[in-house]
Image: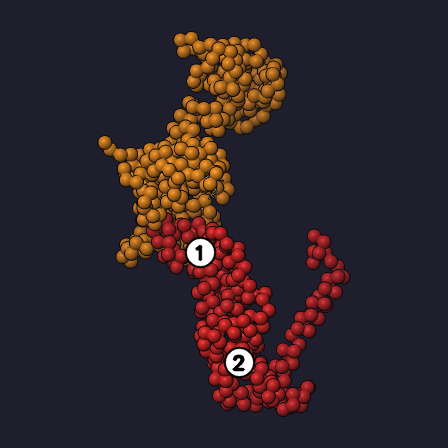
């Protein structure tokens, strides 16, 4: 192959350098924020004149922050459960089903991934206002589930495609009803896809800000909304601390997924 | 009237415009080892799947002891099946795999334990009970699949090319195991393969499939020694087909003329032929002999090549018309016996079959 990595010679060095540059450019802001959250300067001076944990103390002392974090976690968890449940049913239909309009259904279910979020946010805001769902947890969860569905469907459908249907058939000749075969054999066999779907849809809700801003009410704020709101009122290092926690949990979940995948491969 | 144990009646299965199985009728007595043999796409698997309940036939019926199975869903048919692909449940250990059919039948724990141990002993994999399928070789996986399929003592065991993914040596080893298990359990086996050696080695009877129909059903010997059609003759064993003209049949004696003008009497005719009809004479390579005997007919050939195959020699010869003939004489012979290049070879006309051209 023309672009075989092993045969590129000096180009390899250039490619490595370029990749590192891009990665650095993308990650540097995150690193800055984490550093600033431990810095002693109230005005976010860089480099920080000293190191401290007081912004974290302030963060945990403030019930508004804690509330926002708990709200985020609650909504993300419910979103993950709902998205995985719907994603499972949808994946079976998309992978196993033979019906007219299957490709259209696939397209529709995956649209939220490519649709500009703000368009979706305005549409669902107007719609939910009419239904009286604006500013409610249910409304939040429904909106986030729609956004998270592609991230649930893709890993589950991929795992299901890789699962040999003959194994399910074998369970059925063994005497298991089709439902029992799916619950006892197929689901455990594609559990890696289900775990990934759960984590990805949790994250899709956990760090979602645009729809959340539209859905939020003063009494119902997720962590990203709270960060956004605080940014506009006063720029305090507490925000950096909150952001760092947000990033931290995201990172932890991603690492967990990677480790799971590695474990399953062997 | 007593019913045949398993009976397939005028089975037909069409997928849209494609007819996978045209018309299959077959009775299988209890305890028989019957093999579906045939080329790829001839409808063997589809027939098997109709028995398992994975395919609803377009028409026809499948009866077990006189009762139709068609209305019974797959999981209630109580049939054992081993698939071509590896179908062990990947997240369960070998023992749990074998226990699965017993667990879904809600058998008591003690029974399950004992049966699993018996089954693993049957396939000689006792020491692998705790392993996951991923840590087994292909042959071991298929043996576990066999144990799982037999754990609930099904009256019928279906196997769809279970050994096709294995190498030759392993395949022969497991063929031996399957024969032994058939003897020990007395289960009725329907076995699908497109490997004629496997079919001959394993089965009591063979049903030879072609284009969604059964061409001939019989023992391996029947198919080999008394092929009903030229397709059977060509599919089972090796065969030479030589062009010939039918001169006439009187008092059951069929006389033909070969392309070089020689006339041969007493060949076996499948069906009736008109005078002067173009036909093909089938002669097995091992039906040839290098020495003349009282009843033998002769064929003028030119020896092209001789290869030594250990137990026998294989000779490639050419007849006047230019066609090559495969000759594997069973009689002992010295290599100088077959020279010179141009000579006669002999065969018993009663072991040669006449088919329409
Ligand atoms: N689900 C299906 N849809 C359409 N055509 C099918 C389907 N299943 C089988 N066929 C067709 O039916 C015919 C018979 O298939 P079948 O699998 O029974 O053959 P087989 O004898 O088992 O062949 P092989 O030795 O390759 O397994 C083939 O032409 C195949 O393409
Ligand atoms: Mg097949």
Chain ID for orange: B
Residue bearing mark 2 = A223
Q: Colour of chain A?
A: red
Say which quarter of the image contains residue A19: bottom right
Same-subunit check for callouts 1 and 2: no
Determine if residue A199 is in view: no
Report the disc number at residue A173: none
Residue bearing mark 1 = B90
Q: Secondary structure at mark 2?
A: helix
Residue displayed at 55% across by 73% down? A121
Depth check: B73 or A263 in front?
B73
Q: Position of residue B21 (x, y in %)?
A: 43, 36
Query: From what the image shows, is residue A169 above or below residue A246?
Result: above
Residue displayed at 37% across by 51% down? A172
Alpha-carbon span between mark 1 and mark 2: 41 Å
Crowd around label 2: few <14 · some 14–19 · many ≥20 (10 Å)? many
Q: Position of residue B333 (x, y in %)?
A: 53, 19
Question: Quick check: B325 left or right of A169?
Answer: right
Query: From what the image shows, is residue B110 above or below residue B70?
Result: below
Q: Chain of mark 2?
A: A
Crowd around label 1: few <14 · some 14–19 · many ≥20 (10 Å)? some
Depth check: B289 or B39 in front?
B39
């Amino acid at each position: 192959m023309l672009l075989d990595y092993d045969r590129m010679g000096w180009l390899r060095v250039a490619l490595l350098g370029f990749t590192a540059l891009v990665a650095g450019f993308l990650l540097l802001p995150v690193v800055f924020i984490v550093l600033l959250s431990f810095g002693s300067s109230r005005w976010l001076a860089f480099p920080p004149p000293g190191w401290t944990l007081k912004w974290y103390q302030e963060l945990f002392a403030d019930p508004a922050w804690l509330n926002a974090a708990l709200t985020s976690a609650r909504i993300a968890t419910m979103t993950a459960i709902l998205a995985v449940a719907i994603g499972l049913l949808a994946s079976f239909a998309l992978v196993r089903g033979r019906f007219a309009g299957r490709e259209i259904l696939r397209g529709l279910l995956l649209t939220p991934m490519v649709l500009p979020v703000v368009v979706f946010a305005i549409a669902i805001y107007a719609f939910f206002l009419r239904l009286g769902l604006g500013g409610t947890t249910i409304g939040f969860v429904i909106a986030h589930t729609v956004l998270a569905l592609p991230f649930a469907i893709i890993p589950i459908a991929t795992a299901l495609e890789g699962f040999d249907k003959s194994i399910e058939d074998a369970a059925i000749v063994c005497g298991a009803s089709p439902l029992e075969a799916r619950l006892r054999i197929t689901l455990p066999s594609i559990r890696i896809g289900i775990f990934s779907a759960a984590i990805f849809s949790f994250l899709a809700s956990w760090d979602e800000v645009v729809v959340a801003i539209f859905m939020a009410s003063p009494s119902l704020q997720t962590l990203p909304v709270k960060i956004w709101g605080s940014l506009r009122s006063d720029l305090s290092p507490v925000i950096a601390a909150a952001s760092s926690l947000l990033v931290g949990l995201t990172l932890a979940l991603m690492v967990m997924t990677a480790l799971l995948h590695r474990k399953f491969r062997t | 009237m007593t019913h045949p144990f398993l009976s397939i009646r005028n089975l037909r299965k069409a997928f849209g415009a494609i007819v996978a199985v045209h018309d299959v009728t077959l009775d299988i007595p209890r305890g028989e080892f019957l093999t579906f043999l045939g080329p790829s796409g001839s409808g063997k698997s589809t027939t098997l799947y109709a028995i398992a309940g994975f395919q609803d036939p377009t028409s026809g019926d499948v009866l077990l002891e006189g009762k139709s199975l068609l209305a019974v869903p797959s999981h209630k048919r109580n049939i054992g099946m081993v698939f071509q692909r590896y179908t062990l449940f990947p997240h369960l250990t070998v023992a749990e795999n074998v226990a699965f059919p017993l667990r879904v039948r809600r058998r008591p724990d003690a029974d399950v334990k004992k049966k699993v141990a018996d089954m693993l002993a049957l396939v000689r994999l006792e020491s692998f009970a705790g392993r996951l399928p991923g840590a087994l070789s292909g042959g071991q996986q298929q043996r576990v699949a066999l144990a799982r399929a037999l754990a609930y003592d099904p009256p019928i065991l279906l196997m769809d090319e279970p050994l096709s993914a294995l190498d030759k040596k392993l395949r022969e080893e497991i063929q031996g195991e399957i024969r032994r298990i058939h003897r020990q359990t007395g289960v009725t086996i329907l076995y699908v393969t497109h490997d004629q050696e496997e079919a001959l080695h394993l089965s009591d009877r063979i049903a030879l499939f072609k284009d969604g129909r059964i061409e001939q059903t019989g023992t391996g010997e029947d198919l080999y020694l008394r092929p009903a059609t030229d397709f059977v003759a060509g599919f089972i064993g090796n065969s030479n087909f030589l062009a010939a003209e039918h001169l006439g049949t009187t008092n059951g004696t069929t006389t033909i003329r070969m392309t070089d003008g020689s006339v041969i009497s007493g060949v076996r005719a499948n069906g009736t032929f008109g005078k002067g009809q173009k036909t093909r004479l089938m002669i097995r390579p091992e039906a040839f002999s290098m020495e003349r005997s009282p009843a033998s007919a002769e064929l003028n050939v030119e020896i092209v090549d001789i290869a030594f195959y250990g137990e026998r020699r294989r000779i490639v010869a050419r007849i006047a018309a230019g066609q090559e003939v495969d000759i594997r004489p069973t009689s002992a012979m010295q290599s100088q016996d077959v020279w010179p290049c141009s000579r006669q070879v002999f065969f018993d006309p009663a072991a040669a079959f006449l088919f329409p051209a």
